[in-house]
Amino acid sequence: ETGVTQTPRHLVMGMTNKKSLKCEQHLGHNAMYWYKQSAKKPLELMFVYNFKEQTENNSVPSRFSPECPNSSHLFLHLHTLQPEDSALYLCASSQIAGVRTTEAFFGQGTRLTVV
Amino acid sequence: GENVEQHPSTLSVQEGDSAVIKCTYSDSASNYFPWYKQELGKRPQLIIDIRSNVGEKKDQRIAVTLNKTAKHFSLHITETQPEDSAVYFCAAAETGGGNKLTFGTGTQLKVEL
């Protein structure tokens, strides 16, 4: 079983709700990522945390708010989402070490539906 | 930023045939090129990767080739089996920048009996 665990697996929320996605990695990695996977689109990198510091925010709307309290946990706080935000949200982790940087290990994802 | 293009978007082969998926990238600084396989309803999983200091890598029925000059890399699957049916994604990253993968749009591979 993967060392990256995401909860919940499925989430249905209204546009006025506030919810959070959780990701936990047990691989001892120093970097964590949020990706969005929509139908017929490539996986889109949303946020990158390296040693708990956010190093990338790919023009993601402010209704998505990441939080990385430590190198093993990553959250994505959601509020006032739009129906077009419905997608599979994937968390990943890797060990950043220059040329020895490892592959990205993905979690199972959270299937989000905004109604 | 990096831009990765992947072709074809769908590929249907007979069991036992070979399958080839091609990707191009734009950023000459990219030095890491993984390939992920995603089965329906499951997470993407790495099947093979290649770094820019080699031109080819093979792992049993799977091989990847890299042409840095032309900025393209390809996945080759030989002796395809029904369990190879999945969506395959190529990606590119510059590892010194933190392994921020830019993905291609994916190829739906179907291996028919």
Image (cartoon, coloured by chain):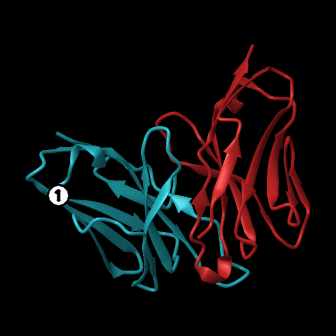
Frontmost residue, B84 versus B68: B68
Q: Is residue A58 left or right of residue B11?
A: left
Whether residue A10 is visible: no
Residue under pointer 1 = A19
What is the drawing colour of chain B? red
Residue drawn at the location 73% of the way across and 81% of the way down: A99
What is the drawing colour of chain A? cyan
Q: Chain of mark 1?
A: A
Residue drawn at the location 38% of the way across and 69% of the way down: A59
Q: Quadrant of the N terminus of chain B?
A: bottom right
Q: Position of residue B44 (x, y in %)?
A: 56, 49
Q: Residue furthest right?
A: B55
Q: Count residues near mark 1 (Cα–Cα under 10 Å), then give few for <14, some for 14-19, many for 20+.
A: some
Q: Circle 1 — which element? A: strand
Residue drawn at the location 61% of the way across and 42% of the way down: B106
User: To which quarter of the image does residue A115 belong?
Assistant: top left
Q: Amino acid at mark 1?
A: Lys
Q: Position of residue A77 (x, y in %)?
A: 22, 65
